[in-house]
Amino acid sequence: MYRFLVTPRWWGINLFVLLAIPFCIFMGTWQLGRFEDRVATHEAAKTRPDPGEQPAVALTKLLPVDQETSGRHATASGRYEDQFLVPGRKLDGKAGSYVLTMLRTGDGKALPVVRGWLAEGGRAPAPPRGEVTVTGSLQASESTGSNGVRAVGGLPQGQLSMISAASLVNVVPYDVYNAWVTLTQASDGLLAVPATAPQNTGLDLKAFQNLGYTGEWFVFAGFVVFMWFRLVRREAETLKDRALGLETAA
């Protein structure tokens, strides 16, 4: 009765099932591993000292930014040059913009410095002149989709949608560090911007999405098995009815 399983059509179905099941299990296991990594990172963060409470060190000693250095207080010296607004940033539920000023350091590269948050409709104060030394919370360059950031097109000149070295190199004539800092003390007329958690860490919504995807992939594997047995049963019943002449009678 089950000789149909070795027909060319069923060979294709069987091959698909044999490939789909381990693929779904692999993807589910991978998503579960991602969730477990986030749990481990979250637990490890509890035992580490608060990055903001550690002493400030030179910027170059904290690069590149990673989970260990994100949020650390970094110091850098240079001269302020170009200034931009980064709109669409909320603080305490109010709409406004980050005031982003480029700090040209002694090596010629520039460090994006968020000097503070400006309420919507306000006027950004000019940066200090001459040589300055800044201390701020170190952050990694933003990317589309990270921390709720969404690139916005069609902005007027002097505004940026993201704080990203990749986008800044297109608007300034010098190299830019792949990081930025938020000043611990905002400039006059601005409010201090709190540091954000490093990307892809902690038990945030994205972490539980990984756990949800784990269940989905295992459900997909079970569904493939269920459908295979259902097709086999239906094919067997069809052949049985045909052999008894029931299908012709119907």
Image (cartoon, rainbow, N blue to C red):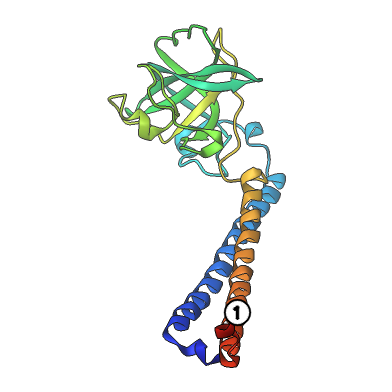
Tell me the residue at 58%/17% (across/down).
95
Q: Is residue 210 visible?
A: yes
191 vs 123: above or below? below
Q: Amino acid at mark 1?
A: Arg
Crowd around label 1: few <14 · some 14–19 · many ≥20 (10 Å): few
From the top left corner, tell me how far across and down residue 145 is, in percent: 50, 38
Q: Residue at x 52, y 22 (%)?
A: 88
**Which x, y percent locates residue 188?**
55, 8
Task: Look at the picture and state if 168 lies above or below 159.
Answer: below
- Which residue lies at the image location 62% right of the left edge and 76% below the top edge? 230
92, 195: nearer the viewer: 92
Identify residue for label 1: 234
Quarter holding the N terminus is bottom right
Residue 163, above or below 99: below
Residue 222 in the image, given as x and y percentages of width and height: 64, 70
Number of dots carrying numbers = 1
To which quarter of the image does residue 70 belong? top right
> Camera-side residue: 84 or 78?
84
Residue 112: image quadrant is top left
Q: Quadrant of the C terminus?
A: bottom right
